[in-house]
Image: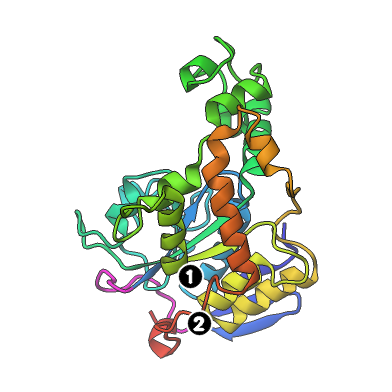
Amino acid sequence: TTGISVCVCAGRLVLSPPVRCMLVGSASATPKEMPTGPIFAFLAFPKVGSTSIRAALHTRELLYNRTHQYHTPLGVCDPWHDRLTGGCFGVPNYAAVNINALDRNWLPALCDVPRGPPSRLCHYITILRHPIDRIESEYSYFCQSCAEQGAYCGTKTAKQFGGIGGNLTCPHMSKTAYFQAMAVSHYTRHLSLRASPPQMAKETAVDAAERFLKASVCTLILEAATDMPTPMQRLARWMGGGVFEEYANLQASSKEGLPAVNVHQGHDKTIINAGFLHGLRDDVELYHRMIQSYRRGESCLPQPIMKWGLQYWSR
């Protein structure tokens, strides 16, 4: 969908347009011993543009680590999808891994916390979308369209979700009933739990989530202004690698990649106070703090420990 293809041909990777070729070292991408170096962990929230980010990360994996053996719909290794084949512990150093940000089990098991197999140090990536736009997209996609094999349809009723609406189920649930049931500050709830040290006295959950994002995460904003680097360009610059940066620049110049989205400006307080979206108030506050940080160029600062060299190319 990006208009840019990646091919492996005669030991070369070809990125077009324009055509670029480079040798990639040995043909085998499987290390003899289980890697212990860092990995890029993408904390993916639903309906924030994660599919486009995963597609870009998959392209990067083809370019550098050649981890195209992960034949999942995600394009990169995912601890849940690949749980029967190692759960991503064996991916090469600096490989990209997709992690459901709402899943509390896989994140600490794979990153940082010794549990089960040796844990890996993770460089975190996430992308935020305005919470109201996110839940509206979620309602349209999961409830009205019954997408992804009807994951939200014909199962739980609005009442079982915890909201109003009686026994209505998707796709027959009204937007108000769905919002009443599902308007939860997912960003704040899950990111604040990763803060180290944990949420401190006189610190709100929003404060803890912001502290974790600013200290540990390359935080992208879906609604980046047109006069700023696109989220893909900022991600490529942070991860490093000239070919991947060129890929991101080509996307930006062709105006492809992440889709255009609506932005609620100046109406947040009125909408949140309407009642059925009251549960989003923490995420709206966190979003506004992080978009200001993004505009100041404070997010996704270069990683000082990144090393590009022969050992990276010849795994």
Whether 119 is drawn above or below 278: the answer is: below
First in sequence: mark 1 vs mark 2: 2
Spot the residue most to the top.
167
**Residue where numbered disc 2 is placed:** 24
Q: Residue 109: horizontal and vertical position, in percent?
A: 28, 53
Q: Quadrant of residue 89?
A: bottom left
Q: Secondary structure at mark 2?
A: loop
Kindly state the secondary structure of the residue where label 1 is placed: loop
Mark 1–mark 2 Cα distance, whole angstroms, equals 9 Å
Is residue 100 visible from the viewing direction of this image?
no
Most extreme residue toward the front, as rendered?
A: 202
Identity of the residue drawn at 64% across and 65% down:
231
Q: Nearer the viewer, residue 150 or 277?
A: 277
- The image's colour scheme reads rainbow
Whole-percent x, y for residue 144 in the image: 68, 26
- Circle 1 residue: 66
Q: Which residues lie in the magenta part?
A: 25-37
Instruction: Tell which of 243 and 10 is nearer to you.
Output: 243
Placement of the C terminus among the 4 image quadrants: bottom left
Say which quarter of the image contains residue 277: top right
At 71% from the left edge and 75% from the top edge, which residue is drawn?
249
